[in-house]
Image (spheres, grey):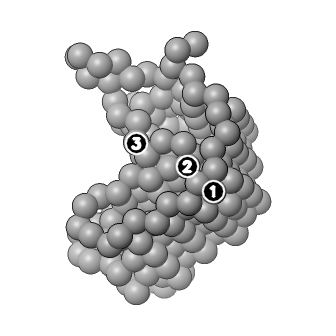
């Protein structure tokens, strides 16, 4: 299948702070929705990431396999190292950090049979207005996204998620 990536990947990524939205993943930073001129429906299958991923910025989507998934599927993939987002929160930003996918939305379909054993960490000085979303498998999922037959054994840590005085901060295993 020409839409399938089957690979082993090991890296370390650290970005500089800045106002831009960062999409960082161990295999792919961002998979966009199809357009009238470009069909991107596909799957990332049987991939492993063992590299430490860290984004030091003001906003972004960070995942052990894919940072932002707008269309397609992630099948039987594994993340085995730390996925960390460290930032100085500013107003009107949104972060999503997941062991497999940071942000799954749009026409993102299945995240199936995936395993995360790495820690998922969000460290900030403050919860942000639009939200901190941290999860062992997916940080944020909406629309048609479906997560099934996945397992997280890594620790999920968010220093502002348990603070009920913060606007929006959610964490899940």
Give the structural element (helix, strand or loop) at label 1: loop
How far is disc 1 from disc 2 in space, using C-alphas? 7 Å
- At a point 38% along the width and 84% down the height, the residue shown is 126
Q: Nearer the viewer, residue 135 or 164?
A: 135
Q: Residues within 10 Å of mark 1 (few under 14, many from 20)?
A: some
Instruction: Choose top left, top right, bottom left or bottom right for residue 112.
Output: top right
Question: Can you tell which of label 3 and label 1 is closer to the viewer?
Answer: 1
The foreground one among 9 and 55 is 9
Q: Residues within 10 Å of mark 2 (few under 14, many from 20)?
A: many
Percent x, y of residue 43: 54, 26
Ranked by sequence position, the earlier of labels 1 and 2 is: 2
Mark 1 highlights which residue? 51
Which residue is labeled 3 in the image? 30
Q: Residue at x 25, y 61 (%)?
A: 20
Q: Residue at x 35, y 34 (%)?
A: 32
Alpha carbon distance from label 3 to label 1? 17 Å
Viewer-side residue, 58 vs 70: 58
| Pointer 3 with pointer 2, Cβ within 8 A | no
Give residue 159's position: percent from left, percent from top.
53, 82
Q: List x then y, in percent, for residue 4.
A: 57, 22
Residue at the front extreme of this rendering: 11
Which numbered disc covers residue 101?
none
Q: Is residue 68 visible?
A: yes
- Secondary structure state at the residue bearing disc 3: strand
Contact check, label 1 and label 2, Cβ < 8 Å: yes
- Circle 3 packing at 10 Å, graded few (<14), some (14-19), many (20+), is many
Q: Quadrant of residue 121?
A: bottom right
Label 2 sits on residue: 26
In the image, residue 173 above or below residue 32: below
Mark pair 3, 2: CA separation = 11 Å
Kindly report which numbered mark, 3 or 2, lies closer to the viewer in this rendering.
Answer: 2
């Amino acid at each position: 299948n020409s839409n399938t990536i089957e690979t082993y990947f090991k890296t370390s990524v650290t970005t500089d702070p800045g106002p831009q939205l960062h999409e960082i993943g161990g295999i792919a930073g961002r998979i966009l929705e199809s357009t009238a001129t470009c069909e991107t429906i596909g799957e990332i299958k049987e991939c492993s990431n063992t590299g430490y991923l860290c984004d030091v910025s003001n906003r972004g989507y960070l995942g052990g396999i894919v940072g932002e998934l707008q269309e397609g599927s992630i099948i039987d993939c594994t993340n085995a190292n730390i996925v960390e987002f460290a930032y100085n929160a500013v107003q009107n930003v949104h972060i999503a950090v997941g062991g497999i996918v940071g942000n799954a939305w749009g026409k993102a379909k299945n995240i199936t049979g995936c395993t995360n054993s790495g820690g998922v960490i969000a460290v900030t000085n403050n919860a942000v207005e639009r939200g901190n979303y941290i999860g062992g498998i997916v940080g944020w999922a909406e629309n048609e996204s479906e997560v099934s037959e996945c397992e997280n054994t890594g620790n999920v840590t968010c220093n502002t998620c348990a603070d009920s005085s913060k606007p929006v901060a959610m964490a899940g295993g």
